[in-house]
Amino acid sequence: MKYDIISAPSYALVEMSLNEGESVIVEPGSMSWMDTTIKPKTEMKGGLFAGLKRRMGGESFFLNTYTAEGGSGKIGIAPGYSGDIIVKELNNETIYMERGAYLCHVGNIETSASWEGFMGTFAEGMLGLRVSGTGLLFFGSYGDVQEVDVQGSYTVDNGYAVAWESSLDYSIGRSGRRIRSFLFGDQLICNYHGNGKLWIQTRSPRNLAAWVHPFRRVQQNNEKGLVLREIFRSWHFSFQAFSLPDIFSNSAT
């Protein structure tokens, strides 16, 4: 198996060459194109429980396996957002990543949900993804990605963290005091401690969603207006059916 990352860092795509019999496991919806020798198969990797854990971690319940059959072939794999793609070789290792970062892998790698924290009374629970095993792991970032070698401690806004090695301990908190955080919506921050690698992205999907939110087109609920209009229309037709000559003729008889 050979691969190449093209169009990085803005619109990165993995171009993977598979020899006959080789396979790659891909997040559903991430296959861009493939040769006719590449055959897809959708399956629930690891059984029902493993699928549920993946779903809880923000990934798909099912995974797609693409295998080269009847000869070698190429496949293009890309995330749904613009940004870069990171390749991490795992050797019986574990890393953690944010929801939606996983793209594909080759080898004996398993994915499951990881509980990242629980914040106070007005709680914000966070589930990420735990990836462990041996093989090549591909994951994406929104925007460019920076690899940070943490030696001691490091603080990142929750929306910018992509992945981190299991050698790093982390805790989740808010940037302000509790009352102020509740009233003014201060952001969640991740505090990392120890020695290990941390990958952060230059853009935050949460910030993009917050920026777009005021400009969204809102469809007004006109159900009540439609009902009233239909009632008025029925009354109008009923009134027209009772013409004045009919009323007088009925009274005369």
Image (spheres, rainbow, N blue to C red):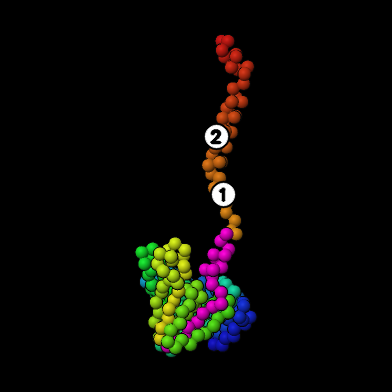
Closer to the camera: disc 2 or disc 1? 1
Q: Residues within 10 Å of mark 2 (few under 14, many from 20)?
A: few
The magenta segment: 195-214
In percent of the image, x 56 and y 45: which residue is there? 222
Q: Secondary structure at mark 2?
A: helix
Q: Quadrant of residue 167?
A: bottom left
Tell me the distance, in whole angstroms, between the alpha carbons under discs 2 and 1. 20 Å
Q: Mark 2 or mark 1: which comes first in sequence?
A: 1
Specify few, some or many for label 1: CA neighbours under 10 Å numbering under 14, 14-19, or 20 or more. few
Residue 57 in the magenta stretch? The answer is: no
The answer to whether one can see residue 134 in this image is no
Residue 204 drawn at (x, y percent)? 54, 72
Q: Say which mark, if any, is on residue 231.
A: 2
Residue with the mark numbered 1? 220
- Between 174 and 215, the one lying in front of the other is 174
Please, what is the three-letter code of the amino acid marked with disc 1? Gln
- Determine the residue positioned at 61% across, 26% down: 240
Residue at x 46% of width, y 67% of height: 186
